[in-house]
Image (tube, helix red, strand yellow):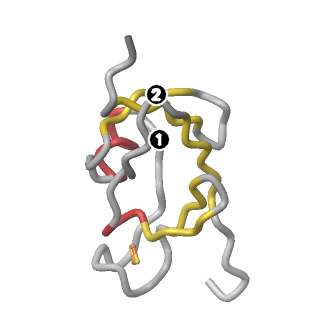
Amino acid sequence: MVDPQQLTIIWPDGSRSAALAGEPWMEAARRAEQTIPTACRVGSCGACEIEVNGVVIRACIAEVPACPGSTLRLNQAFDPYW
Ligand code: FES
């Protein structure tokens, strides 16, 4: 049986890792040896924007969402103004 809090993340390079719902995105990235660019780290600049299943979030202030038994596909969000 799948742990309802455990998710699989597919990173932009195609690698996969496990994460827990509620875990900070930056911690999930660190454990997976992935780099999410940052600048302000308080949610105001947008440098850390990632796209999670098509929704853009600011990773420095966001947590892995609850999505029991599912896979989250992550892409780097590109801001033409950044
Ligand atoms: S690092 Fe600036 S919004 Fe996340």
**Where residue 8 appears, x then y in whole percent?**
48, 30
| Label 2 – label 1 distance at C-alpha | 10 Å
Residue at 67 percent across and 88 percent down: it is: 81
Q: Is residue 4 above or below residue 76?
A: above
Q: Earlier in the sequence, mark 2 or mark 1?
A: 2
The quadrant of the rendering that contains the N terminus is top left
Q: On the rendering, which quadrant does ligand 1 occupy? A: bottom left
Q: Is residue 35 shown left or right of residue 15?
A: left
The quadrant of the rendering that contains the C terminus is bottom right
Q: Is residue 60 above or below residue 79?
A: above
Tag in front: 2 or 1: 2
**Where residue 2 appears, x then y in whole percent?**
39, 17
Which image quadrant for residue 19?
A: top left
Are circles 2 and 1 on residues that touch, CB within 8 Å?
Answer: yes
What residue is shown with label 1? Answer: 34
What residue is shown with label 2? Answer: 17
Amino acid type at image mark 2:
Ser
Residue 32 or residue 18, whichever sits in front:
18
Q: Is residue 9 above or below residue 18?
A: below
Residue at 51 percent across and 33 percent down: it is: 70
Crowding at mark 1 (Cα within 10 Å: few <14, some 14-19, many 20+)? some
Q: Is mark 1 within 8 Å of ligand 1?
A: no
Judged from the image, the secondary structure of the residue bearing numbered disc 2 is strand
Judged from the image, the secondary structure of the residue bearing numbered disc 1 is loop
**Where residue 46 appears, x then y in whole percent?**
49, 79
Crowding at mark 2 (Cα within 10 Å: few <14, some 14-19, many 20+)? some
Residue at 67 percent across and 31 percent down: it is: 14
Q: Is residue 59 shown left or right of residue 42?
A: right
Amino acid type at image mark 1:
Gln
Residue 55 or residue 13, whichever sits in front:
55
